[in-house]
Image: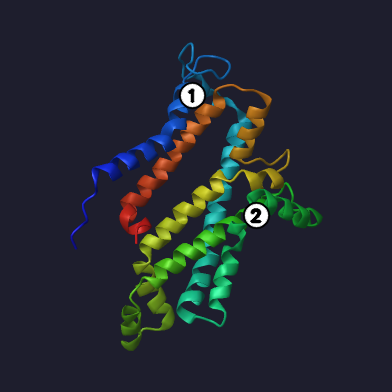
């Protein structure tokens, strides 16, 4: 199929939009290499000391490992729960499937601060505030809608005739699912994994409600650090987070391809 030509005006508009989105990074990146003891743009001197200060800061490093473990657990659970849910909604089509799909997406319609306050009121009597289990449950409420939606779309776009042919040739339902359906869903699984991981790792509002003095995620630790002292360490951490995001995007591109993963 021939691709439609892109007009120069559209290319210019897209370039301006990308420049607008990347403009904060053009400020944060120089500040992260500042030699000053406070945030100032442009910096009066240059140094990479704040990157070294991150690894020397036990609070930040502990928060990073907590965020990494949290994102990993939440991603695994999102796939483990979202995949059967998506399969049931798309392939089995139970009564009220559309209503169930909308119910899964409902948490995304609420402002995050309202959702965080509701979770605080519900989880506090259970003793889940300031616990790793409470953080996992809170983040799952945000990541599961993405997982179900992306996986449902991936399943809906698969040719059902291939699965039916495997079944007619004698393959059991589980064999069809693991040998036929899952391999064809590769791009959807990769995009769901990347999306859930990044959403959980970067979540700050819900984490502010759920964390305590002994348990902080990296975004919460950054928020508390900036609230207490305005040095360029936060800018250095922000640059590293951008690099982490780019690394995840590159992994998606190498394993499944960005076009096949995010463009239908």
Q: Residue at horizontal 50%, vertical 80%?
A: 93
Q: Which residue is mark 1?
A: 32
Residue at (58%, 46%) from the top-left corner? Answer: 203
| Residue 195 drawn above or below residue 106 | above
Q: Which mark is residue 141?
A: none
- Against 40, residue 8 (above or below) is below
Residue 224 percent location from the top left of the image:
66, 32
Where residue 196 appears, as percent x and y from the top left, is 51, 54
Instruction: Tell me which colouring the rendered structure shows.
Output: rainbow
In front of the other: 194 or 96 = 96
Disc 1 crowd rating (10 Å Cα; few below 14, some 14-19, many 20+) is many
103 or 175, which is in the foreground?
Answer: 103
Q: Which residue is mark 2?
A: 138
> Is residue 182 something one can see in this rendering?
yes
What residue sits 51% from the left and 33% below the top? Answer: 238
**Quarter in which the C terminus is drawn:** bottom left
Q: Whole-percent x and y of residue 208?
A: 68, 43
Query: Which residue ends up furthest to the right in the rendered image?
Result: 125
Question: Residue pushed farthest front?
Answer: 9
- Report which quarter residue 78 is drawn in: bottom right
* Residue 55 in sight in this render: no
Residue located at (71% from left, 49% from top): 131
- Classify 10 Å Cα crowding around label 2: few (below 14), some (14-19), many (20 and above): many
Percent position of residue 221, x then y = 63, 35
What element does badge 1 sit on? helix
The vertical placement of 152 against 23, above or below, is: below
| Spatial separation of the CA atoms under disc 1 and disc 2 | 31 Å
Q: Above or below — where is 130 with respect to 179? A: above
Residue that sits furthest to the left in the current view: 2
Q: Is residue 247 left or right of residue 169?
A: right
In the structure shown, which secondary structural element does the residue marked by tag 2 occupy?
helix
């Amino acid at each position: 199929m021939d691709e439609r030509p892109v007009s120069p005006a559209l290319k210019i508009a897209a370039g301006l939009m990308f420049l607008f989105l990347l403009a904060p990074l053009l400020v944060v990146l120089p500040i992260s290499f500042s030699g000053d003891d406070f945030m100032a743009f442009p910096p009066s001197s240059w140094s990479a000391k704040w990157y070294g200060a991150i690894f020397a800061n036990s609070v930040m490093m502990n928060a990073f490992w907590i965020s990494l473990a949290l994102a990993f657990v939440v991603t695994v659970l999102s796939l483990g729960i979202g995949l059967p849910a998506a399969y049931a909604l798309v392939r089995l089509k139970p009564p009220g499937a559309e209503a169930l799909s909308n119910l899964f997406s409902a948490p995304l319609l609420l402002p995050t601060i309202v959702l965080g306050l509701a979770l605080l009121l519900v989880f506090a009597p259970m003793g889940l505030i300031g616990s790793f289990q409470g953080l996992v449950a809170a983040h799952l409420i945000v990541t599961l809608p993405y997982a179900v939606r992306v996986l449902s779309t991936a399943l809906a776009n698969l040719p059902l005739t291939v699965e039916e042919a495997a079944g007619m040739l004698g393959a059991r339902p589980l064999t069809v699912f693991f040998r036929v359906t899952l391999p064809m869903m590769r791009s959807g699984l990769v995009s769901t994994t990347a999306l859930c991981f990044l959403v959980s790792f970067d979540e700050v509002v819900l984490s502010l409600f759920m964390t305590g003095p002994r348990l902080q995620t990296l975004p919460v630790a950054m928020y508390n650090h900036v609230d207490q002292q305005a040095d360029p360490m936060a800018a250095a951490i922000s640059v590293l987070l951008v690099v982490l995001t780019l690394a995840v995007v590159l992994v998606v591109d190498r394993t499944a391809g960005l076009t096949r993963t995010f463009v239908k």
